Image (spheres, rainbow, N blue to C red):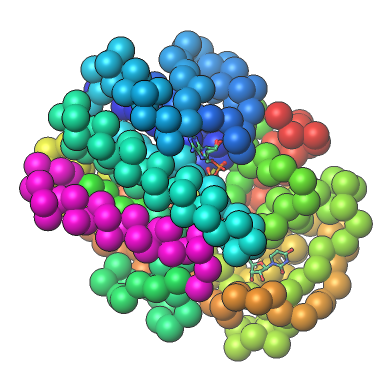
Amino acid sequence: MTVLVTGGTGFIGSHTVVELLKEKHNVIIMDNLCNSKLEALHRIEQISGQKVPFYQVDMLDKEGVTRIFEENKIDAVIHFAGLKAVGESVTIPLKYYHNNITGTLTLCEVMAQYGVKKIVFSSSATVYGMNNQPPYVEDMPTSATNPYGYTKVMLEQILTDLHTADPEWSVSLLRYFNPIGAHESGLIGEDPNGIPNNLLPYVSQVAIGKLPCLSVYGNDYDTPDGTGVRDYIHVVDLAKGHIKALNYLMGRTGVEIFNLGTGKGTSVLEIVAAFEKASGKKVNYKIVGRRAGDIASCYADASRAKKLLGWVAEKNIDDMCRDGWNFISKNPNGL
Ligand code: NAD
Ligand code: UFG
């Protein structure tokens, strides 16, 4: 089958493209490269030994998106493209709403026009908000605390409404927990611009000596060691979850929501220890105050994906840290 992957040169998209190619699917990538580099495409081609058609198109550009559907017979879309920095979304909300929401509306309009009604969407555990208790189950009420989170809550609703209006649509809403790690080749991985916001890229840069010290945001949470607990998932496991979700929706119509996580929580200090073990480097850290908007603990009930998709995360924290370290060691300055 031919799959259009939006955001396919990004962190999760690039790993998913590699898995799609491994499963013998035809892949077309669309990305405007606002948060990724063309080098990711070359690396994907190096890993897979295949040329991958690439369109440098902004999803807000309806003519550009239309051209992709005009020139290719597309069966389904995996939609990663979007802006994802929580703090930045608070500073420039209109840009986030415009890019993520208008961009997705544009994509869906073109899909409908070409009769392509199968979409796998990148949602996030952020939609569980601050009022639910983990483990999170798919039918819990959703909410958000920042514009980025609201784009995910709204897009889940929009895609659900699309199916209500036209039952031929088949929609898979994948709620990712915290993706980390990298492809085992060390050729692709997470490559953030500037100083990282997220824990693992920050820890990696401390380990490699680019940053002096990790600030641990609070050790007074109601967790075993007082630091924040998250459900870290290897990006390759996550990528494989997309293939399963794609296969699931091909034979069906409807809207399905799946948590993609391991179901297991790991604290900030446990991550520091695991990364030190994987890298053989010291990760200096200091305890500072809590970060606004953070919750104590976030982890999945991953049983639905296991039951309906036959998917379970296979890699553990040591695998994630080993592969993350391999990537940054081979690419200390990114791609
Ligand atoms: P990423 O930034 O590495 O990849 C997103 C890609 O989308 C980038 O390559 C960027 O250039 C592209 N893009 C953004 N706006 C675009 C537009 N208007 N037109 C075309 N391309 C555009 O991010 P990622 O970590 O791979 O995340 C992928 C998706 O998963 C995002 O939707 C993100 O919100 C979601 N998600 C990520 C995480 C995470 O922790 N990484 C967690 C939950 C959900
Ligand atoms: N943390 C630190 N120091 C840092 C960075 C993070 O102590 O420099 C802590 C945080 O307080 C939290 C944990 O590390 O306890 C993880 O933080 P991240 O920023 O890596 O991840 P979050 O869980 O806060 O959020 C991420 C994405 C969101 C997404 C969410 C769920 O940034 O977009 O996972 O998928 F919604």
In the rendered image of this protein, does residue 168 appear above or below residue 268?
Answer: above
Quadrant occupied by the C terminus: top right
Q: Residue at x 53, y 30 (%)?
A: 32
Image x and y of residue 184, in percent: 60, 34
The part of the chain drawn in magenta is 145-170
What secondary structure is the magenta-colored segment mainly? helix
Q: Residue at x 30, y 75 (%)?
A: 140
Please tell me whether residue 154 belongs to the stretch shown in magenta: yes
Q: Nearer the viewer, residue 220 or 324?
A: 220
Q: Nearer the viewer, residue 85 or 58?
A: 58
Image x and y of residue 250, in percent: 17, 36
In the rendered image of this protein, does residue 310 appear above or below residue 108?
Answer: below
Q: Residue at x 32, y 23 (%)?
A: 66
Quadrant occupied by the N terminus: top left
Taking 186 as reference, is 139 left or right? left
Image x and y of residue 326, in percent: 71, 38
- Can you name the residue that lies furthest to the left here? 167
Image x and y of residue 211, in percent: 87, 52
Q: Can residue 251 be seen here? A: yes
Taking 156 as reference, is 166 left or right? left
Q: Residue at x 76, y 71 (%)?
A: 216
Q: Can residue 315 be seen here? A: no
Taking 173 as reference, is 193 left or right? right
